[in-house]
Image (cartoon, helix red, strand yellow):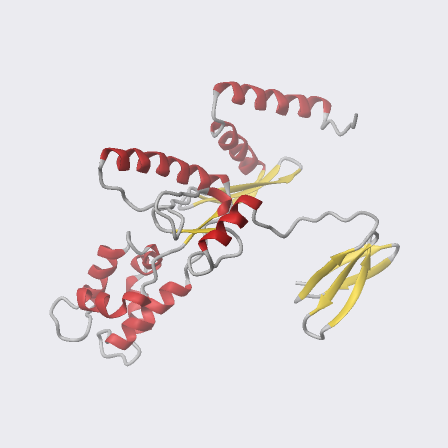
């Protein structure tokens, strides 16, 4: 989508596939990747709202562990137990952690043998369904197929034989791996990881079994101004408006860590509603 920007009555079109090269005193230098040309966009005030970088501690740790263990430039690669890859006793959660999912394709032959219950070299619809049901917790990327089994069985039964061959099974696993998405950088993810890690470390100390971390998306809300908000809760809500704004406020208040914080946040909201936002500077 093109971004239209007005500056001193001049309309400047910033095309897609462009990258900011440099922010100058009163302009931004942009490189157009499609034509490999550069141009400047003048501004009065520049608000930078993109671009992330590792904090110094994470950067130093990545250097120590090496590229074989840490290859993601956005954060520390951790396994399904939130343990930093390449270490034995270091854990990371939140924005600095990138959970590395188990790839189905790597275990392709082994998984096919487990799924092929009658050992006839192909998978029936029942065998494939049972496989997905048994391994969806270990490999969350399979969840999309468990919801619409009939549809996806027909999609990957390329020769329409009524069964899935080993080659077709490989394509299904590859497609599932391609659908893997990183956890969003939100407080919801960090909170669930923190709760999980607290329980996990306690179980490790007691010598108990530790399950892998599994993120459960509870929904998301965003305030868009003028007593309006948009939000979605899986299976319950998807939309926007003032009603969603009230729900967003209630959820935000409920998620405060203490009753004291609830009271302080409520007071701030009432003060802003009566007197408006305080934008004064001292």
Quadrant of residue 110 in the image?
bottom left
Q: Classify residue 260 as left or right of residue 205.
A: right
Q: Based on the displayed image, in which of its 4 quarters is residue 132 positioned?
A: bottom left
Q: Quadrant of the N terminus?
A: bottom right
Measuring 79% from the left and 25% from the top, which residue is drawn there? 282
Closest to the observer, 133 or 86: 86
Is residue 73 visible in the rendered image? The answer is yes
Relative image position of residue 105 (x, y in whole percent): 32, 67
Name the residue furthest front: 64
Asked whether 250 or 172 is in front, the reply is 172
Residue 223 lies in quadrant? top right
Q: Residue furthest right?
A: 8
Q: Position of residue 184 (x, y in %)?
A: 49, 48
Please say if 156 is above or below 197: below
Residue found farthest to the left: 118
Residue 25 location, x and y as percent?
Answer: 83, 51
* Image-based side of 280 in relation to 128, left or right: right
Residue projecting furthest to the bottom: 159
């Amino acid at each position: 989508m093109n971004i239209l920007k007005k500056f001193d009555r001049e309309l400047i079109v910033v095309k897609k596939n462009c990258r900011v090269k440099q922010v100058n005193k009163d302009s931004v230098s942009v490189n157009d990747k499609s034509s490999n040309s550069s141009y400047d966009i003048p501004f009065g005030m520049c608000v930078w709202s993109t671009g992330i970088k590792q904090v110094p501690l994470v950067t130093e740790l990545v250097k120590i562990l090496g590229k074989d263990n840490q290859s993601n430039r956005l954060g520390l690669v951790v396994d399904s137990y939130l343990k930093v890859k390449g270490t034995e006793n270091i854990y990371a959660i939140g924005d600095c952690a990138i959970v590395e999912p188990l790839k189905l394709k790597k275990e392709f032959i082994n998984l096919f043998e487990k799924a092929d219950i009658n050992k006839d070299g192909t998978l029936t619809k029942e065998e494939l369904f049972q496989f997905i049901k048994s391994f969806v917790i270990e490999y969350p990327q399979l969840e999309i197929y468990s919801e619409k089994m009939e549809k996806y069985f027909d999609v990957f039964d390329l020769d329409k034989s009524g069964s899935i061959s080993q080659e077709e099974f490989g394509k299904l696993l590859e497609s599932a791996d391609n659908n893997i998405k990183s956890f969003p950088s939100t407080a919801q993810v960090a909170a669930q990881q923190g709760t999980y890690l607290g329980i996990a470390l306690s179980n490790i100390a007691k010598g108990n079994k530790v399950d892998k971390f599994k993120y459960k998306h509870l929904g998301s809300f965003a305030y868009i101004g003028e007593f309006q908000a948009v939000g979605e809760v899986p299976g319950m809500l998807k939309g926007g408006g003032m009603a969603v704004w009230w729900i967003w406020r209630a959820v935000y208040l409920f998620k405060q860590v203490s009753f004291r914080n609830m009271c302080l946040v409520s007071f701030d909201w009432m003060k802003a509603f009566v007197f408006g936002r305080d934008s004064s500077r001292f």
